[in-house]
Amino acid sequence: MNSLDFTRLRKRFELQSPKSRINIVLFSVEDGNVILFSKNSQEDHMSFLKSNNPIGNVGEFFSNKNNLYVSIGKHKMTGIESNYPIAMRTDTMRAMKSLYINLKRFNKSEIVFEDCQLVEDAIFGLITTSYKYDFLKKSNEEEYSFFLNAPKYTKTMEIAHHQNIARFLGDTPANLMTPRLFVEYARKIFEGSSNVEIHEYKKDFMEEKGMNLLLSVNQGSVEEPRLLQIRYSGKKQDSTDISMVGKGVCFDSGGISIKPSPNMYRMKGDMMGAATLLCSLKLAVIMNLNSNIVLTIPLVENMPSGTATKPGDVFKSMSGITVEVDNTDAEGRLILADALTLAQQDNPSYLIDAATLTGAITISLGSVYAGFFTEDDELANEIQRCGVESNDLFWRMPLSSFYRDAMKSQVADINNMGGRGAGSCKAAEFLKEFVDTKKTKWVHFDIAGMIDDNYIPEIYGEGMTGKPVRGFINLIEKLTVKKE
Ligand code: BES
Ligand code: ZN
Ligand code: ZN
């Protein structure tokens, strides 16, 4: 099969030579009163809407010749325009899903939004709710396409489109998204980008560097591992500002510690740490950020076979620390450990990793929040703020030497497992073992909960959400500005 044309995802918003235009006006209803989100021509809109007696349910809509009025639900106004509550912003995205479905009927080919504070969420919602993974069906019905005319909001549009690309990478089945193919897609995503270097390393490089933890995870697979490094030089100095590491397990069967069959297919998305950071880096390039950023992605398949790692096997990491692999399903921390060691060779100011690391984070936080771990309080506050701003929520989790104590090994320096309880914290503590937190500000994101099974299924539907691309690029941007 040829590689899949994911660029089709955004084409439906970029119709050439549109013929008829429609203006989208958002409204809400509070205690029976209509509230308009619009900066001009309030009176006309208001009298039209009132004559229709709107109830205000999410997605309720009315239209006249030039306007389409969409309700974002019944909400209490806080009065602070720049600080709308998350529930209201999420409802705005929900409303966009029904708008997208209804737009077809109006037969208009150019969409403009009446300017207001919620437009960013609306545009973001319109693009992300329209996502559909139908690349592998014999006939995929022709999608309704139009021109989304919002020149003030190109950044938001790019973020939404790139979140959709991240979803595409995770939704594509593992036989079509092997480590080798992931690199091919990454090349396509960065095609034509300037100030970007792409390095693709193979097994011999990993052997030379002593990345035995990384190699150990892939040794049961017939696919070859890859190590992808993408360097973006956004400024002249050659110091590295941000080094990022994304977990790229293209399929996680669990290995010899094999996972149960029900839902095992979901593990085709065990590379979403890699995918979300890859798309966030592309956004940093598009935004031309004044920053030097390196992204390191270890790409493997975790499979059982005669050559696979056996529970109890010991490997020496690139850093020299030896690891007993008690459970071959705790593979993410192994590939990240070696990748983090490599990433620190650039002496980055910030070290950020993202991974679908533990099922336990879903037990703690569900799909609503991603967990993050850092020793740096200032960075933690920044992350929390970025999350709220981007509607990708982040919750700080604890690091503690007590968790480290649980991972003692009889035969090696550390065990990759630590018994029952606090699975996400132990995984984070394991990673910390490989990070020099005195030299770099490190944060680990465990995004396993929010990649799918979303708390707002009406928005993201089945499959991957692509979260938290919006939060990540916001953080990268904030850290860049901070350093300037
Ligand atoms: N890839 C999984 C974590 C995961 C679970 C991601 C559900 C997305 C959805 C990870 O490699 C894993 O299997 N972790 C184990 C660790 C355990 C063996 C210590 C887990 O969470 O059970
Ligand atoms: Zn696993
Ligand atoms: Zn995994």
Image (cartoon, rainbow, N blue to C red):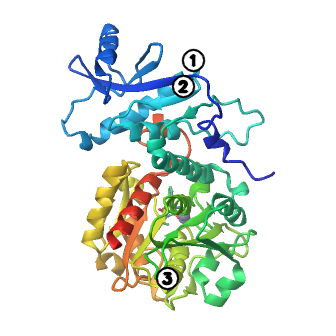
The residue beneath circle 3 is 238
Q: Quadrant of residue 208?
A: bottom right
Compared to 279, does 152 lie above or below? Answer: above
Which amino acid does the dot numbered 3 rest on? Answer: Asp
Numbered mark located on residue 101 in the image: 2
Numbered mark located on residue 182 in the image: none
Which one is in front, 343 or 214? 343
Which one is in front, 65 or 303? 65
Which amino acid does the dot numbered 1 rest on? Answer: Arg
SS for dot 1: helix
For image coordinates 53% across by 69% down, the residue present is 332
Compared to 91, does 172 lie above or below? Answer: below
Q: Is residue 392 left or right of residue 111?
A: left
Binning the other alpha carbons within 10 Å of mark 3 as few (below 14), some (14 to 19) or many (20 upward) gives few
Q: Is residue 206 left or right of residue 240?
A: right
Pinpoint residue 232: horizontal percent, then vertical percent: 54, 71
Q: Is residue 198 left or right of residue 78?
A: right
Q: CA distance from mark 3 to mark 1?
A: 54 Å
The residue beneath circle 1 is 105
Pinpoint residue 367: horizontal percent, then vertical percent: 41, 49
SS for dot 2: helix
Asked if residue 404 can be seen in this view, the reply is yes
Q: Quadrant of residue 215?
A: bottom right
N-terminal of the pair, mark 3 or mark 2, is: 2
Q: Depth-wise, is mark 3 or mark 2 nearer the camera?
A: 3
Which amino acid does the dot numbered 2 rest on? Answer: Ile
